[in-house]
Every structure is written in structure tokens, then in C-alpha cells.
Amino acid sequence: MTQMQINQNRRFDDPKNGSEKNQSNEVVLRNRRASDGGGEDGKMQLLHELQMRHLELAAQNRKFREMHRRTSDREKENDKIHLLHELQLRHIELEMQHRELGEAQRVLEETRDRYANLYDFIPVGYLTLDEAGYVQEINLIGATMLCEARENIIGTSFLTHIIKSDVYVFSHHLQQTFNSSGNIVTELRIMTRTDEPDYIRLESAAIGNRVRACRTVMTNITEQKRIALALQQKRTEQDALLNAIPAIVFYKDLNLRYVTVSQMFADFLGHTVANVLGKTDFELLPRELAENCQRINREVLESGVIKANIENRLTNASGNVVDLSTVLAPFNNSEGNVAGLLGVGIDVSSLKKAADTNLELLLQNRTITQNLYNVQETERCHLARELHDELGQWLTAIQAEAQAILCLSQGESTVRASVQAISESIKEMHEVIRGMLRHLRPALLDELGLADSLRELTNKWCLHNTDIIFEFALEGDLNGLGENINITAYRIIQEALTNICCHAQAKHVSVCLSRESGVTPDADAVFLRITDDGKGFDSNQTFNGFGLLGIRERAIAAGGEFSSFSTPGHGVRIDVRLPLKHQLERRRK
């Protein structure tokens, strides 16, 4: 209801209008009473009052009309402003709706474009097939996989793209798809422009309406299939190798459970391969041995370093004790992280027996060698005494007889000349015998000890090798070393100097003999180093002569250590270490 209608209603319902009506009624009543009274004056007065009342009513009516006009103008103006305000609000609402509709349209178009791109360029083929296998729809990727344009594929049978041997597989796939409510997956091969077919995976689901059709996703799995076939081939080769290799081979995961084992390993434990897989050492080996294996395995996994020559003694399924030498190596996954442990073990029982036998034979040979050196030195002493005592006496007797003949043959020049010749020969024989005696047994070694004997030896060597610079050093207390150490050191230096003189072509030679102090007196040792700057030799080759070999055997026979270092053109260094403890033990024995 508008303001104008309210004002109009108010004119007829106003209490003031009701009061004026009552006043008119009162005039009428007074008129009636005047008529009933019958006076002329009363009528005139009544008429006058009626006229006055009429004038008043007319003035009020004009006043009310003016008020009504003004009210109507104000109401119309208010109605216009209200209507304009409503129009402005409606305009704003329409603009907002327009913008919302525009945004919705833009989002809808983007969604449509994304759907189109997703449908056509998703990295799988997407197609719709009817019950007979005819293509109703296909995306661009699917058409590319089939090597045909999309318009040439729609409406044709999908069977034309499948190799003949897989036609039944596809027909069975369609039958399962339309007879099942879930997804059906099948792998088959399709023809390409090359001689090699592509492997694809079809995953289909029937459309849930009255149309007999199915949605199918086609994925190219050629590369995965080739990798799988290659892995299968490698696995077959690995299994063949594990079954044929005469060694214990196993793979463990990070939990140290067996994931692959060789047939020999399974036979060694008395199980089948299947019974070994998935188990730990605690389920297959004695607890103490299992704990040791687990500890070593974890050390290799944590360090990432190959560990070799791990020896264990086990009892196989037949009850025989076997010595195993194992190599453990961590292996990595494709990301470069440690994925498990590889172990290779071989039975070294026969090798250990052979090594023990060889060691025993070597010890026996060195004992024999030492005894031979002792016998040799004993025989040399005996020969030296025989030469000195027997042959020396005879030479002295011959010299005396020659002097007697010389005294008796005065005036006989021929006899005197012969006697002089005999005397000279006897002197030369004395020098030869002295040289033989020094070679057989250095007299100073027994009389003055090792140090003076070596000085005598080196001085005589320098006299015969004046073109070689020689350095000789003695360090520490070298007294009381024992006959075996003394003669061994003396003979090694003697042999080394002889080799240098004959073969080295050296300009500088150094000999140093010292006594090393150990933690205890029993740990003392004599250390000998001999060096030269001669032509040297290849240390990887075997010794051609007996010089270095004799030095090595003599050092080892005395319970010592021998090492030589040389390269062609850079001379030779010989190191010998003779422990005094070995000499003490020999004395006790």
C-alpha cells in the first residue's frame, strides 16, 4: 500500500471527519427541534447557522484538498527515489551475475580444454569399443599407437591391428569384459610399421547403461616387457650359474635374510634351496657361529667395504668338518644405496692341508739347511785345522830341509837356485793356505769377535775394489751374540760384497750392522742393511744365481727375516733381521 493510498484512507477514517459529521447531525437535530418549536426566528437562525457551517465546510474542504495535493506530490517524489534506488540495486545485481556467469563460462571453457587435452594427449590410448570389437571413439595417443589417423580407425575393427596369434586373446578379453562388472586386464601384441610388434596392456570396463560398449585404456608396455624378458633371461642365467658353480654363493637383504643361494650352499646345509630362502643364519647354523656371521655381515654393510679371507670351520650335512674361506661384498640398488650383501665361499680344506704340509716341509727343509750350514761350518773348521796343522807342518819341514840344503850347497849355483825356487814356492803356498783358512773359517771371528772380523773383511775388500766408495757402520753392543749369529752375519756380508764386486757395477756401497733393542732382552735382534747404487734387477723375477738365494736361506735358517728391494738402474737394498731369541732357544736345546 503506497503513501497516497494511506493518506486517502486516512481522510475517510480520520476522527476529525467523524467530529464534523457529528456537528452536522447536531445542526439537523436543532433544525428539527426548531421546526417542532415553530418559531420563524428559530428557522432564520438555523439557516444562518447552516450557511456558516457550509462556508466552514467549504473552507475545510479546500484546505484538505491542498493538503492532499501536497501529500501526493511528496509521495510521488519518494516513490521515484525508491524506484531509482531499486533499479540501481538491480543493476548492480545484474552486473555481478554477469561477471559470475562470465567467470563460470571461462572456467567451463578451461575445463573443456583441459578435458580435451587430457583425453587426446594423456600418455595412454583411450578408446570405446562395441561388443563386436569395433572402435567407436579413440584419442590421438591411441591412434598414434596404432600407427593410423584417427578418422581411419573409427568404425573399424580393433582386430585388424592385432597380430594373428593374439586374436583369440583379444576376443576372450572382450567376452570377459561384457560378462563382468569389474575391470579386465590383458596383454597382447599389435602390429607396427617395423618388423617388431609392440606389447600393449588393455584394461577394459563395460559401460553401465543400455549401450553395449566398453571403455578401454591401452598402455604401451614394450619397453617394460623387453626389460622383463631381459631380466628373466639374466635370472635364468644366474640360476644356471648358481646351480653349476662349485662354490657357496648367497645373497642377503638388509635384514640378513637369504634371498638367493647356490645349489652347493643348500646341499652343504642339507636343505633345498626353497627351504633356505627367507631364513637367517640363526635358523640354519649353530648359535655361536651364527652370531659371528651376523656381526661380520653388519660390519660389511655399515662400512660398505669388501671383506675377504673370512675363514670359518663348519660341519656340513654329511658330518665332515670343512674350512670355508668367504668373501663378503655389499651390493647397491639403482639409486646407489646399499641393498644387501653378496657372499662367495670356497672349501679350502684341501688347500689348508696342502699349505700345512708345505709349511711343515719348508720348516723341515730349513732345519736341514741350518744343519747343513752347521755341518758346513764344522767341516770348514775341521779343514782349516787340518790345513793349518798338517799341511802347515809339512810346509815348515820342507822349508827347513831347503834351508839345510842351501847351507850345504855352497859353491853349487844350480843347487842354490833350485833351493831358492823351492823356498819361494813354499812362501806362496803359505799365502794360499792362509787365504783358504780365512775363507774356510775367519780366525779373527773366534779370537776377536764379530766387529773386528768384519773390519778385517771390509778392509781387504776395499783393497781389491779401490774404485768403489765404501761406507761401513757398526751400531750398538755386538759382543756376546753367539756363534750362530756371528757366523751368519759374517757370511751374509761376505756373500753380498762378493755379489756386488762381480755383478752390481756399483760406485757406492754401504753396510750397516746394528743391534735393535726390544721390549724385553729376549726381543733384541741384529739388523743388517746392505745397499749399492748398481744396475739393480727386477724384483718380480726369480733369482737367477745362488748369491741372494743363499743369503735368504742362511737368514731364514737362523730364524731371521730377509727382504730385498730393487728396480733396474736403481741399485739393490738388502735387509736382514736376526732375532737373538732364536739363538737363545738353540742354546737351550
Image (cartoon, rainbow, N blue to C red):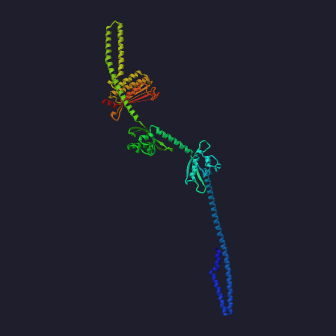
- Where is residue 403 drawn, in percent x and y? 32, 11
Task: Looking at the picture, tell me which residue is in the foreground, 302 or 509.
Answer: 302
In the image, residue 232 above or below residue 174: above
Would residue 316 appear left or right of 169 to someone viewing this image? left
Task: Looking at the picture, tell me which residue is in the foreground, 155 or 394.
Answer: 155
Task: Looking at the picture, tell me which residue is in the foreground, 381 or 450.
Answer: 381
Outermost left residue: 588
Would residue 456 appear left or right of 181 to someone viewing this image? left
In the image, residue 59 above or below residue 226: below
Q: Residue at x 61, y 44 (%)?
A: 192
Q: Report how many numbered discs are placed on residues in the image.
A: 0
Would residue 78 appear left or right of 464 to someone viewing this image? right
Q: Residue at x 47, y 42 (%)?
A: 331
Outermost bottom residue: 38
**One can see residue 219 in this view:** no
Q: Residue at x 68, y 76 (%)?
A: 69
- Where is residue 379 drawn, in percent x and y? 33, 22
- Where is residue 460 drawn, in percent x and y? 38, 22
- Where is residue 121 drawn, in percent x and y? 61, 50
Report the quarter where the N terminus lies: bottom right
Quadrant of the rendered image containing residue 280 = top left
